């Protein structure tokens, strides 16, 4: 199947921590030369949209701001659409995004809040969920790499609350099929002709495959040996983004 669009995950694919992954600039340039539609798709919830764009451009990555799709943006759009006033457990870098929606909490938004994920804050969220308020998760990743170590991401905390309160979380971002559908719609290309390139076997790869996209797993970032065997079907595996040409 031909590839007409490439969706790049960011952390672990194009950069690791604050370091550019070798071959990343060349891979993006190659996709541009072949006139493929590009999107940069991330669940990063510890940087604002502006900070992400600045970081990518500072690393020399060629992107236009409208090519960036983030899970926090998707969560904010959902809140606006449903006119919600959530109790937010999010990182301070993105907290201002939700400031205009303060009020008596009628929902819970949980992202990668790091040190704010305390027993007290989680218990407050639990109390709201037990009142029937919806739980909105910013991404559903199990863990991430900071360039040196694997660290817990928002997913385990989202699922802890979901389990405790017997509620199904609304996931905004990967691996949500609705989120992938939004990105696909933006390139006006069938999902079957879109390639997701990621280091997360569940959030990036399984999510993309379930949404009807093609996918390739890179062995950088959070990748762990044997991750590709966790999928019910074979998937292209690349040593890094530098090998992108082999799957185009």
Image (cartoon, grey):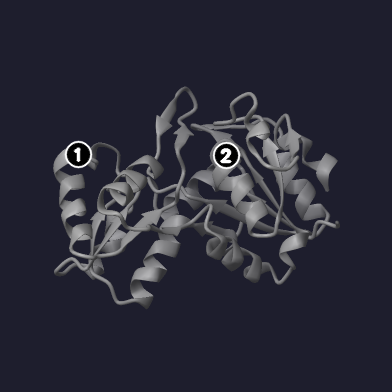
- Residue 200: which disc? 2
Point out residue 38 in the picture as x, y percentages from the top left corner. 68, 57
Vertical position of residue 146 compared to residue 32: above or below: above
Between 222 and 38, the one lying in front of the other is: 222
SS assignment at label 2: loop
Q: Quadrant of residue 50?
A: bottom left
Residue 146 lies left or right of residue 11; in this view the side is left
Vertical position of residue 17 compared to residue 82: above or below: above
Between 194 and 18, the one lying in front of the other is: 194
Q: Residues within 10 Å of mark 1 (few under 14, many from 20)?
A: few
From mark 1 to mark 2, how far is it between C-alphas? 26 Å
Q: Quadrant of residue 226?
A: top right
Vertical position of residue 17 compared to residue 75: above or below: above
Q: Residues within 10 Å of mark 2 (few under 14, many from 20)?
A: many
Residue with the most extreme front position: 166
Asked whether the residues under the numbered discs 1 and 2 touch, taking CB atoms below 8 Å apart as contact, a structural biologist would say no
Vertical position of residue 99 compared to residue 47: above or below: below
Q: Which residue is mark 1?
A: 118
- Count the marks: 2
Q: Residue at x 32, y 43 (%)?
A: 157
Q: Looking at the image, tell me whether mark 1 or mark 2 is earlier in sequence order.
A: 1
Q: Residue at x 63, y 35 (%)?
A: 230
- Residue 179: which disc? none
Point out residue 194 in the picture as x, y percentages from the top left corner. 73, 58
Q: Say whether residue 113 is visible.
A: yes
Q: Residue at x 60, y 39 (%)?
A: 201
Point out residue 94 in the picture as x, y percentages from the top left corner. 33, 53
Quarter of the image for the N terminus: give it. bottom right
Q: Say whether residue 112 is visible.
A: no
Point out residue 93 in the picture as x, y percentages from the top left corner. 32, 49
């Amino acid at each position: 199947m031909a590839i007409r669009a490439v969706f790049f995950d960011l952390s672990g694919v194009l950069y690791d921590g604050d370091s550019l992954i070798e071959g990343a600039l060349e891979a993006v340039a190659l996709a541009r030369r072949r006139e493929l539609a590009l999107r940069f798709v991330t669940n990063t919830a510890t940087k604002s949209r502006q900070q992400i764009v600045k970081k990518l451009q500072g690393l020399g990555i060629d992107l236009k701001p409208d090519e960036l799709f983030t899970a926090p943006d998707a969560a904010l759009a959902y809140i606006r659409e449903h006119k919600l006033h959530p109790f937010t457990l999010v990182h301070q870098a993105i907290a201002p995004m939700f400031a205009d929606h303060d009020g008596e909490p009628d929902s819970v938004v949980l992202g990668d809040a790091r040190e704010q994920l305390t027993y007290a804050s989680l218990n407050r969220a639990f109390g709201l969920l037990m009142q029937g308020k919806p739980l909105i998760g910013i991404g559903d990743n199990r863990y991430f790499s900071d360039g040196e170590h694997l660290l817990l991401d928002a997913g385990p905390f989202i699922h802890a609350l979901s389990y405790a309160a017997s509620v199904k979380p609304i996931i905004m971002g990967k691996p949500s099929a609705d989120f992938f559908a939004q990105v696909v719609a933006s390139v006006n290309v069938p999902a079957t002709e879109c390639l997701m390139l990621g280091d997360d076997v569940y959030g990036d790869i399984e999510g993309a495959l379930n949404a009807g996209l093609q996918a390739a797993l890179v062995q950088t970032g959070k990748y762990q040996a044997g991750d590709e065997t966790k999928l019910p079907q074979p998937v292209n595996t690349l040593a890094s983004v530098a090998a992108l040409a082999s799957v185009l």
